[in-house]
Amino acid sequence: MHLNYTFAAQSFGSDPSSEGGDLNAYESPILQLVFSLLQKAHQQGASDIHWEPLEKSFRVRFRIDGQLHEIQQLPKKLHGAVINRLKIMTGSMSIAEKRLPQEGRFRETIDYQVVDFRVSCIPTLHGESIVLRLLETSSLGRDLTELGLWEDDLALLERIIHRPDGLVLVTGPTGSGKTTTLYAILNVLNKRDCKMITVEDPVEYQIPGINQVAVQDTIGRTFSAVLRSMLRQATNIIMVGEIRDSETAGIAINAALTGHLILSTLHTNDAVSALTRLEDLDVPTFLRSEALRAVVAQRLVRRLCPHCKVPTTLSNYEIIALELTPEALTDATPMKAAGCEQCHQRGFQGRFGIFEILICDEESHQDKPKHTLRDDAVRKMLEGWTTPQEVFSATLAV
């Protein structure tokens, strides 16, 4: 899957070096090149664009549904001019600084949609490498019903988040959709009669009606410092992007015990492991038991393209490995990927969440979730949402 951008390379009369290049002389073709790749990434549903300098070329890759796809090997001579263009678009990154990591963001309108781009630049052996994270403002309206929760799980979660106080944790590895779930919860709770503040690193999306604070460790604006100040803001609901240390955990627990609803994330493999993680963060068991309302563990799984998926039969290995009973297979409709123009021949289109929910409040305290991440993934696979291979991939560590 390669795009033809030779027009940009041919437009250069001389060889702009990878150290910079003359943007005034080559501005038009570079603008076309960069915007074309931004547009292509948006059209194909990419979450990230990787601009990577290699020894003799300049590689561009898209991350689509969690998978990296190489899009183009550009001439190395375009590297400096493209990197400089991306830095200039942020309005805050220095094109003169090539030795230190830099971060920024910019906004672009693509196909009549506003897209925010978060920019991360690091120096590598063969030049500066940039990764753009695409943050579509259109996904701000997503609510809990669109995440992939079954009706009974959705009812459980909605009951918990409408409590006036307590701690609700969303857990999973990096890139498992935790922030998306938190934003969906905020969308449900965002009312005019409710004071809501978030502290994030960084602020992913700007949500109307919510006060959002970005962490900046260099000036002392840490999670714990901001969280402590929030408690003096007469706040109803607080979202903490991540509980990273004992100090933040302690303040969050105390806030949950004093009339605030606290939403946050932890990095654990499953819901039960969150209890152990809180102990590691020096949270006493009796305080955790009083404050914690629920833990939602999740992963993201690729969704089969609805336009081209076809029925399939599970192999004996898959049946045994997934511990499927004859009863479970009775009404099963397993599907496999085929590939079509709608999904760019990949067989998958988008992702959905798999979940396990551990309820910890007095009304329905559980020692373990009603079902595991593997159980949820298998149930959705049997209904034709995804493939057995995706189930194995997503739940291998749990």
Image (spheres, helix red, strand yellow):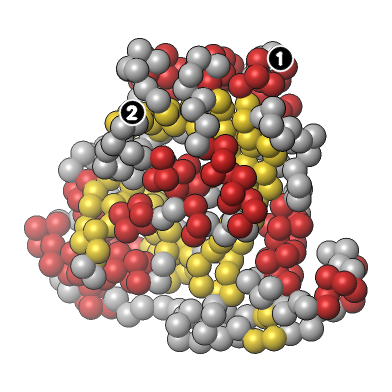
Per the rendering, the mark at residue 195 is: 2
- The residue lying at 90 percent from left, 74 percent from top is 326
Q: Residue 4 placed where, x, y %?
A: 32, 80
Residue 205 is situated, as x and y percent measured from the top left of the image, at: 33, 45
Q: CA distance from mark 1 to mark 2?
A: 28 Å
Judged from this view, the residue extending furthest toward the front is 363
Q: Residue at x 89, y 69 (%)?
A: 325
User: On the picture, is 139 further left or further right than 9?
Assistant: right
Which residue is at a point 43% across and 28% down the rendered structure image? 238
Residue drawn at x 47%, y 69% is 70
| Quarter that holds the N terminus | bottom left
Give, as a three-letter code, the residue at label 1. Answer: Phe
Q: Nearer the viewer, residue 285 or 318?
A: 285
Q: Which mark is residue 95?
A: none
**Numbered mark located on residue 286 in the image:** 1
Can residue 234 be seen in this snapshot? yes
